[in-house]
């Protein structure tokens, strides 16, 4: 009897275990439509580039970018551009309903640079973190009136102060 008990203990019992695939199939049923729906919103774009070919590529002079920048400060506007001298336009208090002379002078300065470089349509506005939003929008409107409709914002880190 003791020999039989030993033999039975030596054998492991076989357990009937089935792999339950239903939860995994439910997951796939939920994920696949979501993936298909999200694929609709992915847009493929092509960048249209006109590169010079042949001899034209070798003879074209490379011009440095204009880099037109307007620094907005509490006391002045500073207009900087490559190839042009830096111009500082003093700002002062403006009475209610009166035209701002600094705004007119800034528009004129930007228009002169815009006429000198007709292919340039952009201006970079540099302002400190404390500059009011209304001032930024006003300078963007002035740049648009001067023929520079593309305005970019940058943080004035204190250079040139």
Image (cartoon, rainbow, N blue to C red):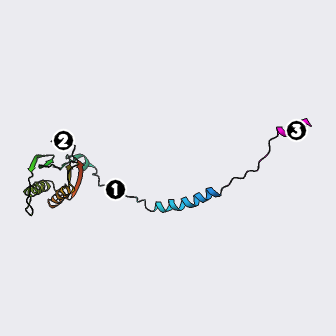
Label 3: which secondary element: helix
x and y percentages locating residue 154 in the rendered image: 24, 49
In the picture of the structure, the residue carrying the numbered disc 2 is 159
Q: Earlier in the sequence, mark 1 or mark 3?
A: 3
**Relative depth, front residue between 84 and 86:** 86
Q: CA distance from mark 1 to mark 3?
A: 80 Å
Whether residue 91 sits left or right of residue 22 in the image: it is left
Q: Nearer the observer, disc 1 or disc 2? A: 2
User: Which numbered marker is on residue 47?
Assistant: 1
Q: Nearer the observer, disc 2 or disc 3? A: 3
Q: Earlier in the sequence, mark 1 or mark 2?
A: 1
Label 1: which secondary element: loop
The answer to whether residue 79 is seen in the rendering is: yes
Q: Which residues are magenta?
A: 1-20
Image point 60% across, 59% down: which residue? Answer: 26
Image point 29% across, 55% down: which residue? Answer: 50
x and y percentages locating residue 72 in the rendered image: 16, 50
The answer to whether residue 121 is seen in the rendering is: no
Q: Are marks 1 and 3 in contact (CB under 8 Å)?
A: no
In the picture of the structure, the residue carrying the numbered disc 3 is 5
10 Å neighbourhood of mark 1: few (<14), some, or many (≥20)?
few
In the rendered view, tell whether residue 65 sits above or below residue 43. Answer: above
Q: CA distance from mark 1 to mark 2?
A: 35 Å
Whether residue 62 sits left or right of residue 94 in the image: it is right
């Amino acid at each position: 009897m003791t020999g039989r008990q030993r033999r039975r203990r030596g054998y492991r019992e076989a357990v009937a275990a089935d792999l339950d695939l239903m939860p995994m199939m439910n997951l796939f049923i939920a994920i696949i439509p979501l993936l298909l729906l999200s694929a609709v919103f992915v847009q493929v774009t092509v960048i249209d580039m006109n590169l010079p070919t042949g001899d034209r590529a070798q003879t074209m002079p490379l011009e440095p970018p204009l880099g037109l920048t307007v620094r907005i400060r509490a006391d002045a506007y500073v207009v900087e551009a490559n190839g042009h001298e830096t111009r500082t336009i003093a700002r002062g208090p403006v009475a209610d309903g009166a035209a701002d002379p600094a705004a007119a002078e800034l528009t004129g300065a930007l228009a002169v640079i815009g006429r000198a470089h007709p292919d340039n349509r952009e201006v970079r506005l540099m302002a400190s973190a404390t500059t009011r939003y209304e001032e930024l929008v006003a300078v963007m409107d002035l740049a648009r009136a001067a023929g520079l409709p593309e305005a970019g914002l940058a943080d004035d880190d204190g250079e040139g102060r």
